[in-house]
Image: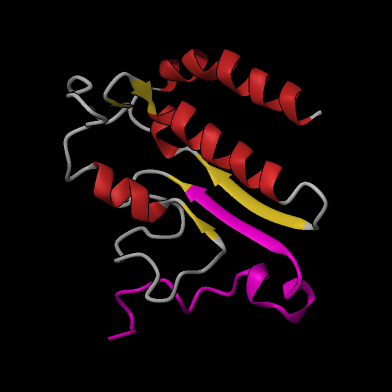
């Protein structure tokens, strides 16, 4: 089934031998228009150890639930959680798990400013918080 409809043929750094003992993460949103999956069905073989796309595809199909309904979801939110915050938490979890290991991660948030460039300012504080946490 692997073929032109999948993104596996893209030459990515985590396919190189130099990253064999490196923890890897690919965290990008918007499965239909994301940087590495544009007009494709994602990767046939999971490209990295941590891969956010599976969650993002499922998020668009299922209503947000915990033990009770969490509220309406949208392109920017899953229940009451902002998508960027979910991505940030996923990335921070990756960094915590591999604190002592060499890492390579690609974090790409298309939804932040794709449709409305002025919406980018809404993510200044969450991004600053993440960068300060990483320091």
Query: Where does the image place residue 94, in percent across and percent down from the top left?
Result: 62, 47
Query: Where does the image place residue 117, in percent across and percent down from the top left?
Result: 43, 22
Q: Is residue 41 above or below residue 93?
A: below
Q: Is residue 85 above or below residue 106?
A: above
- Front residue of 34 and 94: 94
Q: Is residue 21 magenta?
A: yes
Quadrant housing the N terminus? bottom left
- Identity of the residue furthest to the front in this view: 67
| The quarter of the displayed image where residue 83 is located | top left
On the picture, is 10 further left or further right than 135?
A: left
Give me the residue at 53% from left, 40% from top: 90
Any part of residue 113 in sight: no
- Front residue of 5 and 100: 100
Query: Where does the image place residue 12, in percent across and percent down from the top left?
Result: 61, 70
Give me the residue at 74% from left, 56% from top: 103
- Front residue of 99 and 110: 99
On the picture, is 71 further left or further right than 6?
A: left
Boundaries of the magenta span: 1-27
- The mark tally for this picture is 0
Quadrant housing the C terminus? top right
Give me the residue at 26% from left, 42% from top: 59
Query: Where does the image place residue 29, in percent across and percent down from the top left?
Result: 40, 43
Give me the residue at 36% from left, 65% from top: 42
| The quarter of the displayed image where residue 89 is located | top right
Q: Is residue 115 above or below residue 120?
A: below
Q: Is residue 7 magenta?
A: yes
On the picture, is 101 further left or further right than 26?
A: right
Any part of residue 105 in sight: yes
């Amino acid at each position: 089934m692997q073929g032109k409809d999948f993104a596996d043929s893209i030459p990515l750094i985590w396919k190189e031998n130099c990253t064999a003992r490196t923890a890897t993460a690919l965290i990008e949103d918007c499965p239909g228009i994301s940087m590495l999956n544009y007009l494709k069905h994602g990767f046939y073989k999971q490209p990295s150890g941590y891969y956010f796309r599976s969650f993002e595809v499922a998020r668009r199909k299922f209503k947000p639930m915990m033990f009770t309904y969490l509220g309406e979801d949208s392109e920017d939110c899953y229940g009451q959680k902002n998508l960027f915050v979910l991505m940030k938490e996923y990335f921070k979890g990756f960094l915590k798990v591999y604190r002592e290991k060499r890492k390579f991660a690609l974090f790409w948030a298309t939804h932040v400013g794709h449709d409305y460039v002025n919406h980018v300012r809404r993510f200044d504080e969450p991004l600053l918080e993440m960068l300060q946490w990483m320091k």
